[in-house]
Structure formats: structure tokens, C-alpha cells
Image (spheres, rainbow, N blue to C red):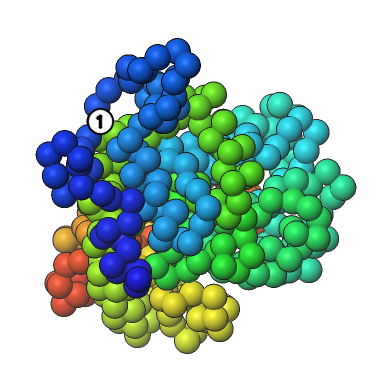
Amino acid sequence: MGFKTRQIHAGVTPDPLTGSILTPIYQTTTYVQDSVDEYLAKGYSYSRSGNPTVRALELKMTDLEDATDSICFGTGIAAVQGVMLAFLNAGDHAIISDVAYGGTYRLCTKILSRFGVEFTFVDGSNLEAVAAALKDNTTLFLTETPANPTMKCTDIAGVSKIAQKAGAVHAVDNTFLTPYFQRPLELGADISIYSTTKYMDGHNATIGGAAVCATQEHADAVRFIQGSTGSIMSPQVAWLTSQGCKTMSLRLDAQSANAMAIAEYLEGHDKVEQVSYPGLKSFPQYELASSQATGYGAMLWFEVKGGLTAGKKLMDNIDVFSLAENLGSVESLITHPVTMTHAAVEEAERIRVGIIDGLVRVSVGLEDVEDLIEALDKALAQV
């Protein structure tokens, strides 16, 4: 069946007791066993390690990516942590995209590095640099593409080949594009990581994450970490995310169309210094973005002439767009990464990877695109 059909029906079966078309919210900690000898015969014992509502979402995500299994976490960064803890031991080395979500950077440099894990942040757009960063103790590659917030793209298939040759696991943070637009496992990656908070939910209603695995061996390793650290998604969140998933493709198509129109408008504005959106022919990696994904997504960034001061004035005076840290929702959001999402990244590192002070990140929503452009036009007029 097609993606749109599967995003509605995968993982969902009518409730056997009532016939409910929606999976019930199993808001329970405990599952009564029939006998000692039949312990776990029904698959559940305690909701820290498994819950039927969460499992329904895991099955849906597995189906959407043609994967083997999925593990849902309480947050997106918990999913990143779960993958890292599953495949990194003291003394191991990981290669991470040099542009990545600030929380991922913080987890690596401020927490896991304390336990003897070494991290190298590498320009994923340069496969030679990725290969050169490889060490004998490299066990994990984590690629974020398109990267947050610069939109830098990485050749997933190329990095996957390097990882396979090294016997390492390649995980791809696919949050920006989802399996509807980009399918990392089909390009050779081992694991797709998601903040389900974003496009899976799509409505600013939940916090969650997931790791979608190509093999059962990898899935079992990640699920062991999830149960051991108590980082499972809650049933209420899983239920809401399951409903959000049903319209994901429709939302992404419409939001991406809006993003393209806005990017083209900004590119022609005399008060805009530069615009970065993978769907623009001017985007440095337009060919790569077009070859490994079927859509360009709804994320973009731009810089107003006048730098930081001008950018702040725009963000403080814009209508319709909400100044907020999240992304991927039906509401359009505008963010200043240097002071918000990437504040944990040191200034020198931000400058090195292109997260400039005047960068304005935009998550384009489902509003009428004419209203969004008018709001930007009015705000730019005040700069």
C-alpha cells in the first residue's frame, strides 16, 4: 500500500473489546499475569519497558520506514541518547555532523565525554573529511541531514558506505524530512532517529522521540537502553502522535510548498542578505538534496542585512509567526538559534560551522502563504 494509506492504518487494529477504531490509551503501570509459567505471555509486565499504546505507534513507524522495529522515547534527545548508549562504550569514538541540534552537541560534549567517549564533529558534506576522521575505535556515526539550523546536507549513502566498511553503526537524524520525504534506511543507514515532537505530531502538543532500526539486533540494543534508563514514551503522547501521523504527508506537502514560496520571496528582497533552503537552485547542495529526498521540507533560514540587530528587530516585530524554539508544527515559528536552540554551542564552534549571529530560522506552517509573506514584508519594512 502507499505511504498515505499506511500512515493512517499501520499499527492500528480495532479494539477487540469495543470495536474502537482508535487504539485505546492504556494508562496503566501494571499488567496482571495469568500464571507464573505464563509470565509475559501477553507481552507486557510494566509500562516502563512496554505499553500497548506506545507499541501501536512503534509498529506504525516501523511500517512507514519499511524497517524491522522501532523504539519510542520520551523525547527526541532521549532517542539520540538511547542510540549513543547502545553503541558507545568508554574508549569508543563517534563521528557526528559538525552542524547538529544544540542538544545533541551538549549531550556529546558536556555529558558523554565525561565517561571516556570521544567525539569528532565533521563536515558531513565532505566525504573525504568524514573518512579522514575515522579511527580504529570508531563505533558510531550520527548524521543530521538537513542539519539544524544551517540546512547543510550530508550524502547518506556515502557516509553509510564508510560506516559499513568500518563495521560501525550509522544513525541519521531524519527529523526535518521524515520518512515521507527521505528514507535513510534505504540509503544504507542502520537507524533513523526522530524527534516525533516535530512533524510526526505536527501540532505542538507532545514531546517524544523514536529510533527506527533496520535490524532486530540494533533494535534490541536500543530497547535495552530504553528500559534500563526509563525513557519510554508515555501512552498519552503515543496516542496523540499516532493521530498526528495520519496527516503527516498532507501537512508536509502543504508546508513545503509554503516554504518554497517564502524562500523565493526572501531571495528577491533587497533587505535580505542571504537565504538557505534546499529547494532553491542557489542552495549549494541543491543536487544532493534533490537526489536523496523527494521533497525539501518546511525549514529555512535567512539573514537580514544589518546582522544581529536587524534580525532581532524583525523577530520582535513580526505577526503571524510565533517566536518559539520548536519546529514542524502547523503554526509558523521563527527562532534565533544563537540565543535559543543552539545557545549551548560555544561561540567559536558556532562560527566555525556557520551558525552566524544574524541567522533567523523559520519553521513554515500551514497558514495561507499570502499572510505569511505579508507578515514578513511588514516586519522587514521596520528593519
Q: Quadrant of the N terminus?
A: bottom left
- Residue at 40% x, 14% y is 35
Q: Position of residue 253 (x, y in %)?
A: 29, 73
Q: Position of residue 214 (x, y in %)?
A: 58, 55
Up the image or down, 181 lies above or below 148; here it is below
- Position of 42 with respect to 227 (left or right) is left
Q: Residue furthest right?
A: 136
Dot 1: within a 10 Å radius of its alpha carbon, few (fewer than 14), some, or many (20 or more) residues? some
Three-letter amino acid code at the position of disc 1: Tyr
Disc 1 is placed on an element classified as loop
- Residue situated in front as seen by the camera: 70 or 338: 70
Classify residue 231 by image quadrant. top left
> Would you name the residue on which mark 1 appears?
26
- Residue situated in front as seen by the camera: 77 or 240: 240
Classify residue 164 by image quadrant. bottom right
Res 300 visible = no
- Residue situated in front as seen by the camera: 315 or 17: 17
Res 33 visible = yes
Q: Position of residue 272 (x, y in %)?
A: 37, 75
